[in-house]
Image (cartoon, coloured by chain):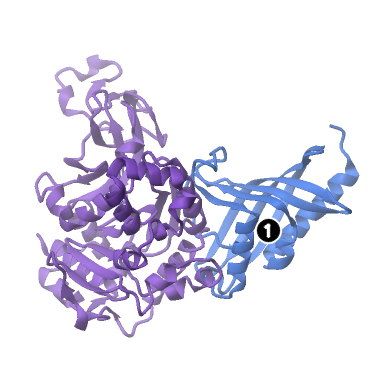
Chain colours: A purple, B blue
Amino acid sequence: MNVEVPHRQWASLIEPGRVHGSLYSDPGIFNLELEKIWYRAWVYVGHTSEVPNNNDYVTKSIGPMPVLMVRDRQGEIRLLLNRCPHRGNPVCVIEKGNRSSFTCPYHSWTFANDGRLMGYAFPDGYEGVNKSELGLSSVPRVAIYRGFVFASMAAEGPTLEEHLGGARRAIDQLCDNSPEGEIELTAGFLRHRTKANWKFILENECDGYHPGFVHASIFSIADSKIGELYGAESTALTRDFGNGHTEVDLRPEFRRRDVPLSWFGTTVERLPAYAAAMEKAYGPDRARKIMIDGTPHVMIFPNLFIAEIQLFVIQPICVDESIQHVTALQFKGAPDLNRRMRQQTMGSVGPAGFLLADDSEMYERNQRGLAVRDPEWLFLERGAHRERRDENGFLVGHATDDLPSRGIWRHYKSLMETA
Amino acid sequence: MAIDNGLLQEVSQFLYQEARLQDTHAYDEWEALWDDDAVYWVPANGEDSDPEKEMSFIYDNRSRIALRIKQLKTGKRHSQTPPSRLARIISNIELLSAADDGIHVAANALIFESNMRGETVWASRNEYTLRRIGDTLKMTRKKVALVNSDKPIYTLSFLV
């Protein structure tokens, strides 16, 4: 089923305080999302640190579609579509490596890692053919913000900076936690297959209402203060940056504690090398502020979730199946912090993680619940009466409010209504 | 090495017992099989990744094993509430070496899991290091190399 939903119908499925269940379960709507979101809007693909050297490549994706993220012979980041223009085969099936060209194994067509067709076997059979038109396709627009590589399959549209808007602050906040101002993704990804629509995952990332319940099993036994951040008394804020980007801003809680590295459940005394490197890089006052504020909890629409110490990429596979790719954030110049980030990440996320196994259980139950016919709607009104504007004009609410979901759906609706 | 049939039988019994305790969610009894310097490792992205530098699905020391068991026992580990129904076959048990540093064993495991999502088959090549303490064996290391560790996998919250 792939039927165009008339524009007027989006308003009948997406209301300010509720959304219709079919948005998560209708394969026709999923196919429209591919055209109007995944193959048009800015989508996060990877990080430049994953291809540090010229000719490095790694297989990535834009929605369900595989792409090759390449650093070409000149050092430029390119996103190539992994499909031989001859008979459609992938030209590369090895997940990552270093090579300056790709040869399709079917008929030996060979492409430079800028996509150019270098040659084919027995060229006399192609007399009169314009070789320059038979290269690997490239993603029309590639843009990089602080090492984060984004792609848009549309030749025209808003710039990446316009798209990120106020959410750039969260990415800047993240990078500031490195003494060198850069993050690196070097620890490899855990890949968690989940039988649920991608938007259940997207909405949960800044849902501050669930942690105290979904994660009660681990908060009750581990020496963790995460539960307090999402309690009824929390001063943390949910924020809607517009363009579908949302965050839970935990800085008010960390500032109230006023203890550097408390955000990470540790102290300067336990990470002396890191603290010293931060002071050297930023001066004592700024370093202290950065180490109090910690890292962000921000969901960059539609697929990049920065969760304090982890980076998640949400990949839709079909209407009721998604993959969560997750790795530990690593800060350039902070080996002692990085080691602990890896250990905590392995404990908490991925298919066996103390946290994410249970989040994913909820996503799969969300999906199965849609088979029940009444009520047909999902309810999003929590905190609607207490939304307010912050000093930058962004909507903010209590840590446990549905404000992020409402922001996501507002943006989603505008994308889906665009012809 | 010449096959020590007595040791092979003892080791096989130990592995079958471990499998039964896992299948039946006998959490305390399973935890009691571990010695204090335990490492419980389920690598991701192939079986040769370096768990000190790269992500693994599970890379638990003794205290994290204890936390894992404690979480399961809260009754609020939602991905195991209700618990997966499990049956596993342990086979191809091979004694690799037996020396002062422990008894090294390899085996294959095939696990059938049934839960609310559906039915899932898991297959792995396992490695164990066992230690003799008095007249019992204890586990000091268990590595579970899932054959599909290089692909996205479903939630894995039962004891593998």
Instruction: Give the labeled residue for mark 1.
Output: B88
User: Which class describes the residues within 10 Å of circle 1: few (<14), some (14-19), or many (20+)?
Assistant: some
Q: Name the residue located 76 percent from the left edge and 45 percent from the top edge.
A: B93
Q: Position of residue B66 (x, y in %)?
A: 64, 62
Q: Could you tell me if residue A302 is visible in this image?
A: yes
Q: How many marks?
A: 1
Q: Which corner quadrant of the image does residue A231 belong to?
A: bottom left
Residue A136 location, x and y as percent? 24, 32
Q: Residue reaching furthest front?
A: A284
Residue A184 seen from this side: no
Q: Is residue A199 above or below residue A62?
A: below
In the picture, which quadrant includes the C terminus of chain B?
bottom right
User: Residue A26 versus residue B76: which sits nearer the camera?
Assistant: B76
Q: Residue at x 68, y 51 (%)?
A: B38
Residue A358 lies left or right of residue A46; in this view the side is right
- From the viewer's perspective, tell me whether residue B10 is left or right of residue A232: right
The residue furthest bottom is A374
Please state the horizontal and vertical placement of residue A40, each as a whole percent of the image.
17, 51
Nearest the viewer among A9 and B81 is B81
**Would you say A228 lies left or right of A47 here?**
right
Looking at the rendered structure, the secondary structure element under dot 1 is strand
Give the camera-side residue of A359 and A281. A281
Above or below: residue A68 compared with residue A386: above
In the rendering, at what x and y percent does residue B60 appear? 60, 53
Q: Amino acid at mark 1?
A: Arg
Chain letter of mark 1 equals B
